[in-house]
Image (cartoon, rainbow, N blue to C red):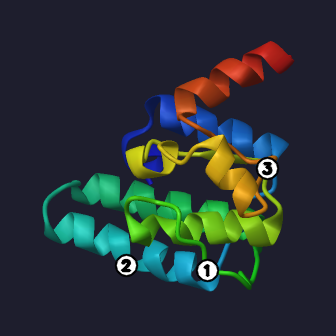
Amino acid sequence: MSAFAFGGIPARAVEDVVARHDLLFSRALLTEYRAVPAELLARRKITAVQWRALVAGIAAAVAVGRVVVPRKRLQLCRDPGDDMLLDVCLAGRADVLVTGDADLLSVDAEQLRAVGLASLRILTPRAYLAGARERM
């Protein structure tokens, strides 16, 4: 969400992800994406201009993405609310999750292997972009 509201490195990472990977969503994740922009605006965490950019960015991402149906509920994150992203990764057989969320970034490779996500890399936008440049 920060990519759409604030731009910068997260926005560049999203652009690259869209070009190279399938975006994955679940119904639960889409529900959160509908609710969060209004909450951020109400709490004055973003401006009206940022709200419009956030809503438009989410809509554009969802339009090119694919909805998956998680069959398993994982419990790996320090923040249980973030587990839904790992559920989506498992259901969609994702190979990369780009995030700035510290709770997701703290999940280690051994934990991922134990639940069937051995090939998943969880990267910050900066680390993802650094790897993308190396692949070019």
The location of residue 105, given as percent across then percent down, is: 50, 43
Q: Is residue 74 shown above or below 129? A: below
Residue mark closest to the camera, 3 vs 2: 3
- Is residue 106 toward the left or the right of residue 71 in the image? left
95 or 126, nearer to the observer? 95
Question: In terms of secondary structure, where does tag 1 sit?
Answer: loop
Cα distance in 3D space between marks 1 and 2 = 21 Å
Question: Split into 4 quadrants, where in the image is the N terminus?
Answer: bottom left
**In this figure, which residue is indicated by the disc labeled 1?**
73
101 or 36, nearer to the observer? 101
Kind of residue at disc 3: Ala
- Which comes before the other along the chain, label 1 or label 2? 2
Kind of residue at disc 2: Ala
**In this figure, which residue is indicated by the disc labeled 3?**
118
- Residue at 53% from the left image edge and 70% from the top image edge: 75
Question: Split into 4 quadrants, where in the image is the C terminus?
Answer: top right
The quarter of the displayed image where residue 108 is located: top right
Q: Is residue 91 shown above or below 109? A: below
Residue mark closest to the camera, 1 vs 2: 1
Neighbourhood count class around disc 3 (C-alpha, 10 Å): few under 14, some 14–19, many 20 upward? some
- Residue at 45% from the left image edge and 30% from the top image edge: 8
Cα distance in 3D space between marks 3 and 2 = 31 Å
- Which comes before the other along the chain, label 1 or label 3? 1
Neighbourhood count class around disc 2 (C-alpha, 10 Å): few under 14, some 14–19, many 20 upward? few
The answer to the question of whether label 3 and label 2 lie on touching residues, with beta carbons closer than 8 A, is: no
Kind of residue at disc 1: Arg
Question: In terms of secondary structure, where does tag 3 sit?
Answer: loop
**In this figure, which residue is indicated by the disc labeled 2?**
35
- Is residue 92 toward the left or the right of residue 107 in the image? right
Cα distance in 3D space between marks 1 and 3 = 17 Å
- Residue at 29% from the left image edge and 73% from the top image edge: 38
**Residue 54 has which mark?**
none
